[in-house]
Amino acid sequence: MKLQFEGRSVNEAFSRTTVAAFVAQLDPTVEELSDIKTAVSEAVTNCIVHAYRDKLGVVYISASIMPQSRIVIKIRDKGCGIPDIPKAMEPLYTSAPEEERAGLGFAVMQSLMDKVKVVSKEGKGTTVTLERRIRCKEA
């Protein structure tokens, strides 16, 4: 699945709902679906708030189903990039303290997903890859 949309706050709910509809074919539990939606929401919000700042940009999402019921979701922007990824991933760190942000986005993503990978180039943009295995429901 591929999706692209303007990086506006009003589109954040659309993005997580679209990803949830795609993931639904794996028959996830309510908790698994909620975790994935929250992680996608955090990643998309990072694009809107931090990558593009006061400019309007495009957010790109792709989602794939891999063997063993794994979902791989990539959220990408062409924004300012992250100069120090390890620092940015520290809990409570924010590049926008004036906006009273909590700085917990990456920590939340890491707590909800099996794997979170961040690749970024200053001035070029950032890609956040989220991976999660969907457990088989008990009969």
Image (cartoon, grey):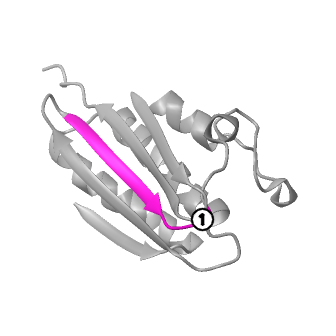
**For residue 122, which quarter of the picture?**
bottom right
- Residue located 66% across and 49% down the image: 83
Expressed as whole percent of the image width and height from the top left, the position of residue 130 reads 39, 41
Expressed as whole percent of the image width and height from the top left, the position of residue 16 reads 41, 57
The boundaries of the magenta stretch are: 70-80
- Residue located 76% across and 40% down the image: 93
Name the side, left or right, on which 61 lies relative to 40. left
In the displayed image of the protein, which residue is found farthest to the top? 138
**For residue 138, which quarter of the picture?**
top left
Q: Secondary structure at mark 1?
A: loop
Q: Nearer the viewer, residue 37 or 98?
A: 98
Tag 1: amino acid: Gly
Instruction: Provide the residue designation for mark 1.
Output: 123
Expressed as whole percent of the image width and height from the top left, the position of residue 45 reads 58, 58
- Name above or below for residue 99 compared with residue 118: below
Q: Nearer the viewer, residue 116 or 18?
A: 116
